[in-house]
Amino acid sequence: MTDFNLEKRRYVLGGVAIAIITVYIIRLFTLQLMSDDYKKNADSNAFLKKVEFPSRGAIYDRNGRLMVYNQPAYDIMVVMNEAKGRIDTTEFCQALGITKEFFIKRMNDIKDYSKNPGYSRFTQQMFMSQLSNEDFSIFQEKMFRFPGFYVQHRSIRQYQTGVAAHVLGDVAEVSPSDIEDDDYYKPGDYIGKLGVEKSYEKELRGEKGVQILLRDARGRIQGNYMNGKYDRKPVAGRDLTLGIDEKLQALGERLMEGKIGSIVALDPQTGEVLAMVSSPSYDPRIMVGRSRSKNHRLLSRDAWKPLLNRSIMGMYPPGSTFKTSQALTYMTEGIITPSTAFPCSHGFYCRGLHVGCHSHASPIALVDAISTSCNAYFCWGLYYMMGNRTKYKNPYEAMNVWRDYMVSMGFGYRLGIDLPGEKRGMIPNADYYDRNYRGSWNGLTIISISIGQGEVTLTPLQIANLGATIANRGYYYVPHVVRKVEGLPLDTLYRHRHYTKASRRSYD
């Protein structure tokens, strides 16, 4: 008689055995073919891939004076798989002049994926960066006692003088977001953080090289793998030549000592920035090496905001410098002629509204109104433009025509300078006033914009660019601080003329 229970148990046991064998096969397949952990381990035992960092491009002023260059530095790297439990931490800390607490924290941070994305215990990780020659020489004598720790030759930026900090910028260690944005970077790499160091990062940084070294079973370096057949030499970064004149820049910074503000000097024929001063400033030489973080923190907490580049980030009422743009607009639109005269009795008076002005002859025509900076003259011009029903249907249309002139002159939007952080300033339009005055406004409501007050704000760079458009009689080149990139043509953005809406005759 057949025992069906025994037959069932036989099937169950067979199924369990097959399941166990299947799990083992899948696991072996995963480990050997799908996972690269063992391959990394084997490779790390046999090879040491040593990254060779390129020399970062130097920076010169327009006359060939060296402004930024490189000097040697050393990074301490660690392969966690080799260093674990094999070193005397007390002796190690003494050799580097650090505390045991710092050592423990740093080792934990390296293994923390949130702080060190892409961490692998088989590859070199940054332990400590930018050691000076002095610090490195002490450590080098004892390095053979610390298995798993290696030295990587690097370079750090140095500044020839203490000027142009906001233009030059600085270099610092990459953040997790930098690594996420560009896979060129690995933890411990450096990147431009401010100024041209940031905006021309790809040109300045060059390309990394790699040296593949062969190791024996004890981890000792035996030489280059296959005589360096698979090594790749680093490619140096490109040098930059700025439009900045270092001596002019230094003069501007001396003139602004103890003051808050900006100086911008442009070459109208090219758009090159000859000087860009923002005060208060700081010495760029304090933003290098291991002290950068501490100094940056101090500067960022300073109430006078020395890190702020007021030349492109400061937005201010332009005041009387704005009046030339108004004269050009009124003349081109036919609101005035050079001989048109307006009264000024210590200011503009109309329907109970008064805008003050200083004492001068009255009535006054255009040239004298500019030379004496008469407020009343430009108030009358805007008043008649906003109220001109022969030319415009209503103040809304007139206001947008005015806005178009201002935008064409480089106001209200970023000019596009090759520095990070440029602000756009403020040029109001008709919709802005409709929202704020519920559609009930006229020329008198907004009269202060005619003299560079009210809602109008510009950056010092935009004001300097206004001067360039007048010098060129109606056009400008986008301002730029870099004059030449080694081996590359200048971006077409900086070689194209931008014409304003004002007529050549008005400029003359």
Image: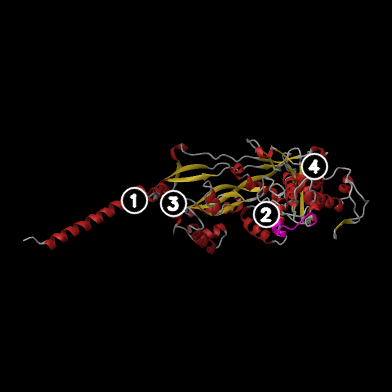
Q: Which mark is on residue 122?
A: 3
Q: Name the residue under label 1.
A: 30
Judged by depth in the image, the label closer to the viewer, 4 or 1, is 4
Looking at marks 3 and 1 on the same chain, the residue that comes earlier in the sequence is marked by 1
Quadrant for the C terminus in the image: top right
Residue holding disc 2: 286
Q: State the CA–CA distance, disc 3 to disc 1.
A: 19 Å
Density class for disc 2 (Cα within 10 Å; few <14, some 14-19, many ≥20) is some
Q: Is residue 409 above or below residue 426?
A: above
Q: Nearer the observer, disc 4 or disc 3? A: 4
Question: Which numbered disc, 1 or 2, marks the residue that appears first in the sequence?
Answer: 1
Q: Is mark 4 on a helix, strand or loop?
A: helix
As measured in the structure, the alpha-carbon distance from the residue carrying label 4 to the one carrying label 3 is 71 Å
Amino acid found under the numbered disc labelled 4: Thr
Q: Is mark 3 on a helix, strand or loop?
A: loop
Whole-number angstrom distance, CA of label 4 to CA of label 1: 77 Å
Which amino acid type is shown beneath numbered disc 1?
A: Thr
Q: Name the residue under label 4.
A: 332
Q: Tell which tag, 1 or 2, sits nearer the viewer.
A: 1
Mark 1 secondary-structure assignment: helix
Between label 2 and label 4, give the one nearer the viewer. Answer: 4
In which quadrant of the rendered image does the N terminus lie? bottom left
Pick the front one: 182 or 84: 182
Earlier in the chain: of badge 2 and badge 3, it is: 3
**Distance between mark 2 and mark 3 Cα atoms:** 35 Å
User: In what element is the residue under mark 2?
Assistant: helix
Span shown in magenta: 434-444
Identify the residue at image location x=50%, y=62%.
Answer: 104
Residue 50 location in percent, x, y? 49, 45
State whether the magenta stretch is mostly helix, strand or loop.
loop
Residue 89 in sight in this render: yes
